[in-house]
Image (cartoon, rainbow, N blue to C red):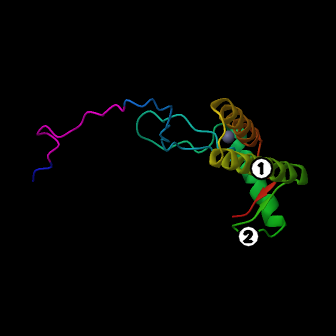
């Protein structure tokens, strides 16, 4: 079977004369801590894969599941503190507002400077959301 890949198929990328500033970061699926979600380092060699970034996170998941059992939470249920929930909701709202502002400015005739300001605002709101420390009190199983 011939795929053409080895017979001079076009493998070189064409460079557009128009400058584009687009950065695409490929997401490599990494194992993540089952408690905090931090990416785990690749395990060298064969063996059981790590599930937690630290031992205390295994314990915290265990405790969160015990608390969930006490409250009879279902497998889709997660119990958050009011503070965490309200902070998540507020930050999502601010990101949504920034997205709406960005869409409006992109649809209009904003200058490059204005677009840069809008993008920076959007980046700040997204950064606030990413920095939120989400830790449940209980996780159903
Ligand atoms: Zn962790």
Q: Does any portion of residue 34 appear in the rendered image? A: no
The first of marks 1 and 2 along the sequence is 2
Quadrant of the displayed image that contains ligand 1: top right
In this view, 48 is above or below 62: above
Identify residue for label 1.
97
Q: Secondary structure at mark 2?
A: loop
- Mark 1 vs mark 2: in front: 1
Please say if the residues under marks 1 and 2 sit with CB atoms less than 8 Å apart: no
Badge 2 density bin: few <14, some 14–19, many ≥20, Cα 10 Å: few
State the residue at coordinates (50%, 42%). 27
In this view, 48 is above or below 115: below
Numbered tag placed on residue 22 in the rendering: none
Identify residue for label 2.
74
The residue segment tinted magenta is 4-16
Report the quarter where the C terminus lies: bottom right
Q: Secondary structure at mark 1?
A: helix
Residue 125: image quadrant is top right
State the residue at coordinates (65%, 34%). 111
Of the pair 65 and 74, the residue shown nearer to us: 74
Badge 1 density bin: few <14, some 14–19, many ≥20, Cα 10 Å: some
State the residue at coordinates (77%, 50%). 97
Of the pair 133 and 63, the residue shown nearer to us: 133
Of the pair 15 and 29, the residue shown nearer to us: 15
In this view, 19 is above or below 87: above
Task: Report whether the residue tagged 1 is closer than 8 Å to ligand 1.
Answer: no
Q: Does any portion of residue 8 appear in the rendered image? A: yes
């Amino acid at each position: 079977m011939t795929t053409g890949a080895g017979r001079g198929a076009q493998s070189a990328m064409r460079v557009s004369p128009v400058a584009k500033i687009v950065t695409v970061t490929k997401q490599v699926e990494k194992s993540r801590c089952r408690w905090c979600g931090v990416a785990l380092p690749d395990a060298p060699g064969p063996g059981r894969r790590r599930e937690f970034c630290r031992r205390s996170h295994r314990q915290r998941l265990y405790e969160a599941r015990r608390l969930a059992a006490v409250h009879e939470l279902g497998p889709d249920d997660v119990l958050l503190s009011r503070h965490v929930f309200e902070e998540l909701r507020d930050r999502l709202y601010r990101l949504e507002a920034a997205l709406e502002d960005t869409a409006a400015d992109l649809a209009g005739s904003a200058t490059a400077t204005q677009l840069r300001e809008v993008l920076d605002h959007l980046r700040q709101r997204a950064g606030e959301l990413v920095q939120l420390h989400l830790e449940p009190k209980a996780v159903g199983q």
